[in-house]
Image (cartoon, grey):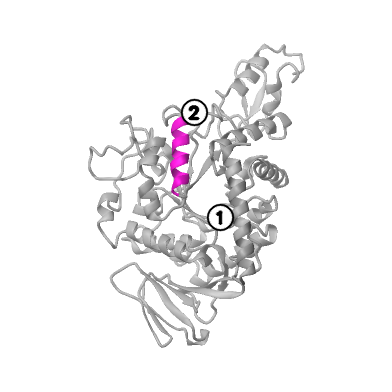
Amino acid sequence: MSAKRWNRKMQRLVCLIICLLLCLSGCRTSRTSGISRTNMDNYRTTYEIFVCSFCDSNGDGIGDLNGIRSKLDYITDLGFDAIWLTPVHPSATYHKYDVDDYCAIDPSFGTIEDYEALLKECHGRGIRVYLDLVLNHSSEEHPWFKAAADYLHELPSDWEPDVSYCKYFDYYNFSRKPKDGYAHLEGTNWYYEARFWSEMPELNLSSEAVRDEIRDIMAFWIDKGVDGFRLDAVTAYYADDREANTEFLRFLKETARGLDEDCYLVGEAWTDRDSIASLYTSGIDSLFDFPFANEEGLIARTLNGSCTASDYVEGMMQAEEAYSRANPDYVDAPFYTNHDMNRSSAYYASDSGPVTKMAYAMDLLMTGNAFVYYGEEIGMNGAGKDENRRAPMYWSDDPGEPDKCTDPPYMDEFQMKFPSLDDQMADDKSLYSWFKNVIRVRNSYPAIARGITKKADAVCDDKAAAFFRSVENEDDLLIVMNLRGQTVEKDLSELGKGYTLAEKLCTNEESITYKNGALTMPAYSIAVFTRK
């Protein structure tokens, strides 16, 4: 048994003893009413890092693992307690989603020792690390595919493949006939499945040999200290086959749990709420909540006026109900943007900051494990082609900034809408300061991440989103958001006495006032109430 697994077993034993003592002393647990939440340590605030664009530590212009390690003070000071790293494996592309070797580090990012050092320092700070695990496909340069391709080049045209001679033939999906989503294997009369790109051959995930390889890959990284995996494109494991995708997710969940009971899995399911709920029946911990994300999602549609504030609250309630019904132990994974989407600064062309601030507050004040893409905390630009969305972190205006990475290949030139991090850190009204304050509020009140949402009907309307966030049948928090550009006034007297205004989050110089049940909220502001 590895030292990491032994330490985690001891940690669970200590936690069980503490829980028993708390129960015996009459203290409440943090278990949420109506939703069984056994993985309480997965309720985190996670920072997504596109590795090659974040921080360069050695002057070659490429972001690397030691660069990330040098910025852990920055990450923890913002309030994040988990990081998701996009793929770190060897690959010829800048994005690394075509993997050449699943058990190695791309030399441009550092060494396996650098990765171990990053993990050690993160864990010393209470930060969990999630590894991006790309299982739909490998690179065409992966030894598995090269061995299979070499075998087919040598195979006489009238012979049938024999996996006892070349086991790697079974690792991919080959056909003698052209099919939709298949690419031609040059120099042969064979075709192989490659739905994302001809240089990304699809793995045969039904192969027991491939599943054994996946188990070994997960074990390798868990033994290194990885806390979980972000699973790429889970709706595409099997094309147009939700049942097969769910079964494969179940395999991954059971495999991960067999290796480490605390291993966390979050899947990318770019689809609608009902389809996400269906995938939750696999038992997976989390799935990214795409219906709220992007410029077409519920958050943006609420702020641009095509949906009401009440629609946003009801959307949260409907998602919680659908997901908890499918998997009582689920942990939602809300997010607003990621490396495949336009940056949020492009969503509201005339916005000088308040609307963008509110959008991320709407994301960060949802339940679950909230994810934030690097650079969003300072409102970085990046729209159109993928390379633009993955621009170097805007640390400073100084052209000699040592941490700055070079632009990804073929990235367009464009100006940033908001100032650099250096400038924003000195401004208490900046996007950076707003992010830091909202994350502080999220982390200060456990019910925000772990509770159940219930609409405050007496207050909620088309302009103001008002909801309770409760734990154990108690309305622990009342959160009111003014999602419009005008002041709103609310009478909270119908809600009864006992609510105290605990937090005021304002996007401009005006402040929230609350007296004798009368609440006045300036444009784009948030009030958080606690109840004694």
From the top left corner, tell me how far across and down residue 302 is, in percent: 47, 65
Along the viewing direction, whichever of 184 and 532 lies nearer the viewer: 532
Q: Is residue 26 left or right of residue 466?
A: right
Answer whether labels 1 and 2 touch (C-beta < 8 Å). no
In magenta stretch: residue 225: no
Please say if 116 is above or below 285.
above
**Callout 1 environment at 10 Å: few (<14), some (14 to 19), or many (20+)?**
few
Pick whichever, 396 or 184, lies toward us.
396
Please report whichever mark, 1 or 2, sits nearer to the chain's N-terminal start. Answer: 1
Where residue 295 appears, x then y in whole percent? 46, 55
Which residues are the magenta region?
113-125
The residue indicated by pointer 1 is 41
- Amino acid at dot 2: Ser
Q: Secondary structure at mark 2?
A: loop
Query: Horizontal and vertical percent for residue 522?
Result: 35, 75
Screen quadrant of the N terminus: top right
Image vertical order of residue 313 relative to residue 399, above or below: below
Residue carrying label 2: 91
Work out how far the residue at label 1 is from the one at label 2, CA to CA, in angstroms.
Answer: 33 Å
Is residue 148 visible in the rendered structure shown here?
A: yes
406 vs 182, left or right, is left
Residue 339, visible in the rendered structure? no
Q: Indicate the position of residue 223 as horizontal and vertical percent values.
A: 58, 36
At label 2, counting other C-alpha atoms closer than 10 Å, the crowd grade (few under 14, some 14-19, many 20 or more) is many
Which residue is drawn at the image coordinates 25% and 39% (left, top)? 401
- The amino acid pointed to by label 1 is Asp
